[in-house]
Amino acid sequence: MSDSAWGLLFLAVLAVAMPAGMIVVSWVAGRPRTGSLTDVTPYECGKKPFTSARRRYSVGFYLIAMLFIVFDIEAAFLYPWALQLGDAAAEVGRGFVLAEMLVFLTIVIAGFVYVWARGALDWES
């Protein structure tokens, strides 16, 4: 067998052994199950929980979370992109790099204004 085949075989064995080992260790080292109702009752700050943990959340919660991720990733993308374009400015010119950045920011701001105008950021609706 070639070196790459041995590496692939090792990776496959490791991919099966790690989860199996974690399950075995948790089973061996875990707390034994008892039939007591106290052991299986949810505990929240010393009080019984108000509602079920399986209740449904509003779609607005997920929408706000997804929009936060999208705009957060775009904001985090600006810094390394600015560094890269700073190096490219010497080659192609500062005007082109500035125009490139303005096009990107215009698209991001247009997306934000669209989301805001559609009412996706209104928590009460």
Image (cartoon, rainbow, N blue to C red):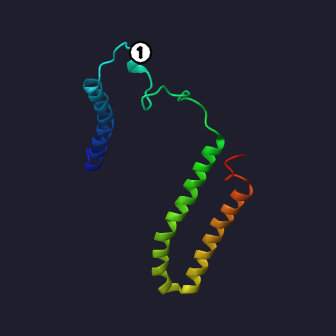
Q: In this rendering, is residue 119 above or below 28?
A: below
Residue 55: percent from left, percent from top: 58, 30
Name the residue rendered at 38%, 20% in the picture.
Answer: 39
Task: Out of 28 and 125, give the one closest to the viewer.
Answer: 125
Q: Is residue 23 above or below residue 102?
A: above
Residue lying at 26% horizontally and 48% vertically, measured from the top left: 2
Which residue does the numbered mark 1 point to in the structure image? Answer: 37
SS state under label 1: helix
Residue 45 at what x, y percent from top left? 43, 32
Instruction: Give the residue at x 43% y 27%.
Output: 43
Where does residue 87 sit, x and y in percent of width and height?
45, 80
* In the foreground, 100 or 37: 37
Q: Residue 26 lies in what quarter of the image?
A: top left
Could you tell whether 88 is left or right of 70 in the image?
Answer: left
Residue type indicated by callout 1: Leu
Dot 1, crowdedness within 10 Å: few (<14), some or many (≥20)? few
**How many numbered discs sit on the rendered protein?**
1
The residue nearer to you, when weighing 36 against 113, is: 36
Front-lying residue, 108 or 35 = 35
Relative side of 55 to 116, left or right: left
Q: Position of residue 11 (x, y in %)?
A: 31, 42
User: Which quadrant, please, contains the N terminus?
Assistant: top left
Query: At 33% from the left edge and 34% from the top edge, which residue is drawn?
Result: 19
In the image, residue 8 sits, relative to residue 31, either above or below, namely: below
